[in-house]
Image (tube, grey):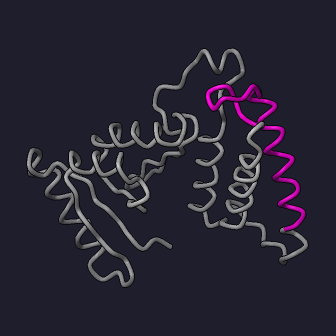
Amino acid sequence: QRSKITALHQANIQKECHGEFLVNMRKATKDQKGIQYEELNISDAIGELLKDPEAFELIVLPTECGNSIQNIAMSLVGGSSIVPSVHIGDKYTIFEQGGNNPCYSKVKDKTANPTGLILAASMMLRQVCLPSYADLIEEAVFKTYENPEIRTPELGGNYSTTEFTNKLIQNLHVRHSRHESESEEEPALAF
């Protein structure tokens, strides 16, 4: 459901590794109808991302370049705890909160924002072919954020992790009830 993919690279410096990355990206997007593919040097992309983040729809980049882009993205939306992250490998996929270094003091005093982890779980549900459940979770997250009073301290509120999560769960129940009445039940999957 994406129409534009931007591959970020440092092929001018890391010719072999990033060159191979670009070759593979070109192959993967060559025959994809309706997808605009572009390549940007990471230095240029950082400036563009800061000026106009909405110009990017989906960014793909080698792992070692991820931290700088990730830090910019997190600063644009309110912090490391808001952003989900996924690392995709040949055999395994890891879903996590965007920030690699969680603020343990916020966890200890129960003011950490769980949004990044919750949205990462939603991404995982899509990966295992359960998109309707992912939709329910995402809708509950967005509904929770509609009320500016429901915020953890890093976003200017005074809700604890538990209070924020409880509000999100309430919104999830409302969305789930509506979803059940509108559609047939999904078949249970055996793992």
Magenta-drawn segment: 150-178
In this view, the residue in front, 147 or 4, is: 147
Q: Position of residue 5 (x, y in %)?
A: 35, 66
Left or right relative to 134: residue 95: left
Left or right relative to 10: residue 173: right
Instruction: Looking at this view, name the residue that lies furthest to the front.
Output: 51
The quadrant where residue 32 appears: bottom left
- Please determine whether, in this image, residue 140 is positioned above or below residue 133: above
Q: Position of residue 34 (x, y in %)?
A: 39, 82
What type of secondary structure mainly makes up the magenta span? Answer: helix
- Please determine whether, in this image, residue 103 is positioned above or below residue 26: above
In this view, the residue in front, 140 or 47, is: 47
Residue 39 included in the magenta stretch of the image: no
Residue pictured at 84% horizontal, 73% vertical? 185
Residue pictured at 67% horizontal, 15% vertical? 108
Q: Which quarter of the figure is the C terminus placed in?
A: bottom right
Q: Position of residue 13 (x, y in %)?
A: 9, 44
Residue pictured at 61% horizontal, 27% vertical? 154
Left or right relative to 27: residue 149: right
Left or right relative to 98: residue 56: left
Number of numbered tags placed on the structure image = 0
Residue pictured at 49% horizontal, 45% vertical? 85
Q: Position of residue 173 (x, y in %)?
A: 87, 54
Residue 163 included in the magenta stretch of the image: yes
